[in-house]
Amino acid sequence: MRYAPPGLCVNDFALLRDDDGAYAVLHLQGPWTTEFDHLRMETSYGRATSTDLVDWRPEGTVFGNGLPGRFDQQAVWTMHPFRHGTGMAMFYTGVSGLTPDGWPVQSVGLAYSDRTDGTGWRRHGTAPVAEADPRWYRTGERMGWRDPFVVRDDESDGWVMVICAADASLPVEVSGCVAWATSPDLEHWTVHPPLISPGDVNELECPVLERLDDGTWLLLGSIGATRGFEAWTAPRLRGPWTRRGQLGPTGSYAPRVIPAPDGTRVVLHTTPRRVGLTDTGAHCRGMLAQPKSLVVHDDSAPRLEWWPGLDAWLGEEQEGSVLHAVGDMDVRSGRPVDITLRTEAPGSALPALTLTCDGKNLRVTGAHAAPLAETILPEPPTTLRILTIGEYVEIYADGVFALTTLSYSGHPAPWTATTDGQTHTIPVRPIRLPSPHRDDASSVWPGPTPA
């Protein structure tokens, strides 16, 4: 359902689908720490496999740092593997060390494999294949040159790479941009001025390109300040690019697009954990969340919706106390409603996890009404779908992914909705976890021990 390797955290990742329909995820993996260590947190890629994008099986480590003295000697960050010939090519971020002020020195490298399952990588030479051009991008302090993503050029027989970078013409706090480069052969690259430079983004990370059925392009980019991701569309790779706004809410990050087993497009993303597994802990590297359907209609903005592939993991409706569950609520009356998902103690009436819907306002609070997350919807919703898996909470408004948060407080209780002083119980469908006893994100917080 969600995934992290036992004892470790997941950060940015890439998805592969083999000819037999099997999936593999390659992901940055690192230990739990209270502070991010640029040189020690992410020095290898883990790999896991799945047949359905829900039940992930850890398969160990498949890639790591380069040898001393090379551009990737200290860390390897976000990667993009893809089919090439009878095997695969993979572009990845290498970190050689830190600047005098402690900023990571980043460049892009290349590796090949004769296999198609995400294993068997060999580096292409000892030097990077693409580096930041100081004419347009920051180098050295506060630089960005990471998270490469490569597709076939739509105007030549070559290739296009997009990269997370920092626009040298802008103040550093708003310099986040998408750089791009072109190549005839994957090994020799020409860097160009920024493809997208919004002018109001501190970091535009993990850019992803997807060609849509009508031949137009979709670009997803993670926004460092909001910890969510946005969408852009364009008729051609070279633009013009139109900003489509937020696609993934705060708490969803580093998206990737992949065909689901039924052929439809889905987006997977990461979600954080909290240090100490408490509501007051700082956010830290986290886990892979379950898929969402990517919906693009004509000229409307893309959106993420509930993926029907999850329905097979849901049980029959009941009104009991369930920690991992999905429930639906009709809110078309428009009156404010408080939905209690957990209580402070078994049998207690004191809420410990509550969703409040008041017109266009959605708000999640924890124990003692402590604020956890909130958003303002474009329109008042008519229905809400709520998913909880352990500490992880997702809210869908009229089927669209709208809000996510973490809550480590409270005890399972029957879900209740209170409107105008009247309370009724909400039926829920229990979620069957793929590996409920494994020490990963599917069970890292199984819930408090009943008092």
Image (spheres, rainbow, N blue to C red):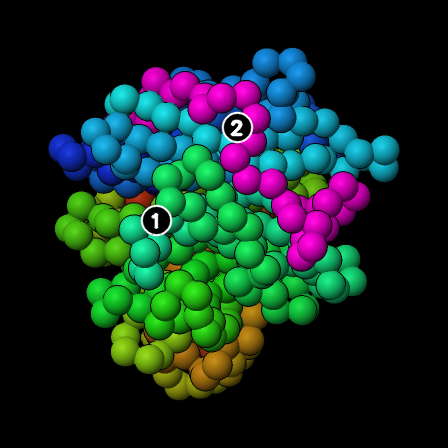
| Mark 2 / mark 1, whichever is N-terminal | 2
Label 2 to label 1, Cα distance in Å?
Answer: 32 Å
Asked if residue 52 can be seen in this view, the reply is yes
Residue 295: x percent and y percent? Answer: 30, 66
SS category of the residue bearing label 2: strand
Residue at 35% across, 79% down: 300
Residue, disc 2: 29
Examine the image and state in which quarter residue 397 appears: bottom left
Tag 2 and tag 1, C-beta contact below 8 Å = no
Residue 176 in the figure: left or right of residue 125: right
Prevailing secondary structure of the magenta residues:
loop
Q: Amino acid at mark 2?
A: Gln
Looking at the rendering, the stretch of residues picked out in magenta corresponds to 116-144
Residue at 28% across, 40% down: 53
Residue 268 in the figure: left or right of residue 229: left
Examine the image and state in which quarter residue 298 appears: bottom left
Q: Amino acid at mark 1?
A: Gly
Residue, disc 1: 158
Residue 174: x percent and y percent? Answer: 72, 63
Question: Per the image, is 132 magenta?
Answer: yes
Between 430 and 307, the one lying in front of the other is 307
